[in-house]
Image (spheres, rainbow, N blue to C red):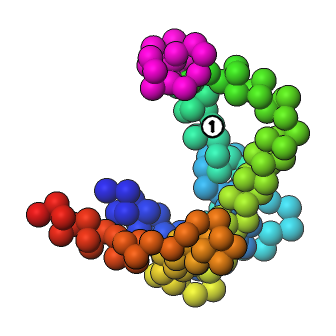
Amino acid sequence: MAQIVTATQMVIEERFVIKHNVPPLLAVGWEGECQSSRVPGYQGDSNHFPVYHCLCTAGTFGFLTLSVLLVPMYYIPAGKLSGNENGTLEDAIDAFVQIGNSALLALSLLMNIVSIAFFNFAGISVTKELSATTRMVLDSVRTFVIWVFTLLVQWETFQYLQVGGSYHHRLYLY
């Protein structure tokens, strides 16, 4: 189901950015709710689609959803599976304390945010200049490239089952 949703999103993004000649960075900002103020300096095709300014709401829905869900997760007991002192599903307060006490953790979190922003920008750029199909192929190749990189820098060792792992796994199940 996730692949269908992702493929649908890619096709819609491709049609949108090509039809309205939207710059990739603006399209990344539009992946959320928009407010109805004109974008200064943007000369898009306003005859077919009014240009709106988006206040960096690409992650607003996810942020608000997780923020609301963290409250009940703080109180739901999970026992030994939790991995935190309170024994609950999530301990957001402890997470913020850990981030505040560790510059390395805060830097890692910031770099993760930057890498995701760059990934989204690069993805929209590929979609606009080439196609959604090319973007999905590159996305699939990304996993292979990361795996090869981890082998080259010796962060993991090569296992023959990794090459055809899902095929061997399927044979084993039947």
Q: Quadrant of residue 27?
A: bottom right
Q: Quadrant of the C terminus?
A: bottom left
Q: Position of residue 10 (x, y in %)?
A: 49, 69
Q: Position of residue 65 (x, y in %)?
A: 55, 33
Instruction: Look at the picture and state if 53 lies above or below 105.
Output: below
Q: Which residue is mark 1?
A: 63
Q: Position of residue 85 (x, y in %)?
A: 60, 16
Any part of residue 47 in sight:
no
From this viewpoint, which residue is outermost toward the bottom?
A: 130
Residue 170 vs residue 10: left or right? Answer: left
Q: Image point 51% across, 84% down: which residue?
A: 134
Q: In the image shown, does 77 or 134 lie closer to the viewer?
A: 77
Q: Quadrant of the N terminus?
A: bottom left
Residue 172 vs residue 54: left or right? Answer: left
Q: Image point 68% across, 58% down: which residue?
A: 116
- Which span is picked out in magenta? 71-89
Helix, strand or loop status at disc 1: helix
Q: Image point 40% across, 76% down: which residue?
A: 160
Q: In the image shown, does 12 or 75 lie closer to the viewer?
A: 75
**Is 82 in the magenta?**
yes
**Is 83 in the magenta?**
yes
Q: How crowded is the residue under tag 1: few (<14 C-alpha within 10 Å), some, or many (20+)?
A: few
Q: Quadrant of residue 173?
A: bottom left
Q: Image point 48% across, 81% down: which residue?
A: 137
From this viewpoint, which residue is outermost toward the left?
A: 174
Q: Quadrant of residue 16?
A: bottom right
Instruction: Look at the picture and state if 61 lies above or below 83.
Output: below
Any part of residue 168 in sight:
yes
Instruction: Look at the picture and state if 32 lies above or below 102.
Output: below
Q: Amino acid under label 1? A: Phe
